[in-house]
Every structure is written in C-alpha cells, then in structure tokens.
Image (tube, helix red, strand yellow):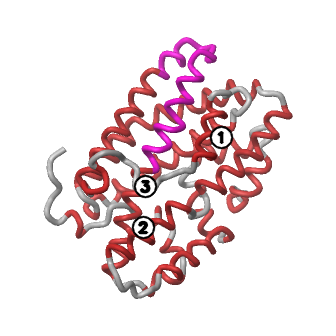
Amino acid sequence: MKPPDPDVWERRFIPDRLTPLPFTPVWAELRPAERLRYNQLHGLYGLEQIIFFEQELIVPLLRRLQPLVRDADLRRSLDVFIAEEQAHSAGFHALLRMLRPAWYAHGWRHFVHPGPVAGAILSAMIRRPRQFPFLLWLVQLLEERTMFASRLFLADESAFPAAIVAAQRQHLADEADHVRWDAALIGQLWHDAPPWVRRLNDRLFSWTLGEFIAVPRRAALRVVDELAADLPGLSVPPARLKAALRTLAGRADFRQSVFGRDSVPRTWKQASTAPDLRCVVSRWLAHEHSP
C-alpha cells in the first residue's frame, strides 16, 4: 500500500455515529482537535475489531461448520467466504500499518486484547457449533453492521482518507453475499437445534452482545488512554471520559445506534420472529418493536 497523503491525519477515520463518546455530554467539552484525534484512534480500533472478529470468530467457525452443511452449493460457497475474509483482514492490517506503522508493523493488535479466559471460552464454543448456534446470529449481526458502516463511509467519502474509503468499498462489495450465506447457515443450524439449546443460546447471545459489543468496555477505554497520551492536557480528564462511556450501557439512544433497524435490518427482522430469541429481542431490540 502506498504511503498516506500528507493530510491523512487532518481527516476523520470513521463516521462519528460509529464511535461512542459523541453520545455523551462530555463530547461538547472537548476541543475540535481532541474530537478529531479521538475519532482517528477509535477508527484504528474499529479496524482491529473487524480483523479480530474475522480471524478469531468467523474464519474458524466457518471451517468447523463446513463439513456439517448439507447443501453442496452452500458448502462450496464457504470456501469463497473464508478466502474473502482472509483478504479483508490482510487489507485492513495493511491500512493500519500505513496509518500508524509504529503500532502495527508486526501485528494488528494494539487496542484489542481479549483475556485468555475469554479467548479459551470462544474457541471452545467455536469447536461445537451445533451446541452454540448463537454464534451464527452473532456473525450475521456483525457482518450486517459492517455493511451499514461501509455505507456511512461511502455516503461522505470526502471526509475520510481515500485508502480507508477504498477498503470500505471493497468490504461492502463482498459482505452482501456473506450475509446471505449467514442466513442460510442460521436456517439450518438454529432451527435444527432442540428448543432447550436455543433457549440457552438466546441467553448466551444476549450476554455476548452486552459484554463485547453493545457497551463500551476494555478496548474503548484504551482509546481514551491513547488519546491522553497523544494529546497531554486534555480539556476533559480521562477519568471523566471513561465514566461518561460507562453510562451508555443504559442509554436507549446508544443501543439504537448500535442495533437500529437501519443498521441491522435483516437480523432485526429474523430475530423478531425466530423461535427462542426472546431474551435478545427484549433486551437489545426493544427500541425497535414499534412498526
């Protein structure tokens, strides 16, 4: 990838809607330069997050699922799915290296560091997709949300560095097939599962969303630490910024920004009528119950 334009750090790296701090009152207290750098750092974290889910969840899960898929065409499609996810991860890592080589020259992790216990639990569940079919719902939700994110980039592409827009355009082009294949996998494994397995997975799915996606934790707080390191003397102390992020757990407007019908329409529609997903729907999609 060619070196970035000289003005790359004068532009945002991600749409503000995809970052949590603008949903808090303290956002208005930050200086414009501080808001911009927060956006950029959260944009780097967002790229890491995509790579994490592709490499630690989606690719190993698809490889484990492939022998279980009854439909031969779908089974072959998973080869394409896996290859495209590998290409996405490589492209996003190249983008990270270009934007911040000191952090990403030898790996893609800077903000995302799941603990060994969480990693071991995820790996154990991936090895047993029949027992944990909620992982397919999780994959579809993540991929549908990344499609929504890519559209936000393309709708305002002049606001972002050209390399980021190009990566998002390619990502969007591939994800439409991925979401269709996700739905087909859900149609087989979720509906094949006994009701008690679905009910247990409903609760696991709801817990996973709260622990890793719906509420700013761990990596999102590390973004604040890096902001303070990049720009000493912040107009709002880091402790206050972190405290403001923690308040978002109970905010319906923030949940809607993450799981709104505009961002995950297929998942919203399927989950709302699926057997035994009442916990997820009532906790995370309640703001969307009205037609």
Q: Earlier in the sequence, mark 3 or mark 1?
A: 3
- Camera-near label (1 vs 2) is 1
* Residue 256, disc: none
The magenta region covers 49-78
Sequence-first disc among 1 and 2: 2
The part of the image, by quadrant, that contains residue 252 is bottom right
Kindly report which numbered mark, 3 or 1, lies closer to the viewer in this rendering: 1
Within 10 Å of the Cα at label 3, are there few (<14), some (14-19), or many (20+) other Cα atoms? many
Q: What is the crowding at mark 2: few (fewer than 14 residues within 10 Å), some, or many (at least 20)? A: some
The answer to whether any part of residue 240 appears in the image is: yes
Q: Residue 100: x, y in percent? A: 27, 57
Sequence-earlier tag: 3 or 2: 2
Q: Secondary structure at mark 2?
A: helix
Query: What is the number of the mark on residue 121?
Result: 1
Residue type at tag 1:
Ile
**Is label 1 in a helix, a strand or a loop?**
helix
User: In the orientation shown, which residue stands out farthest toward the top?
Assistant: 72
- Is residue 53 highlighted in magenta? yes
Which amino acid type is shown beneath numbered disc 3?
A: Gly
| Residue picked out by circle 3 | 46
- Is residue 11 toward the left or the right of residue 192 in the image? left
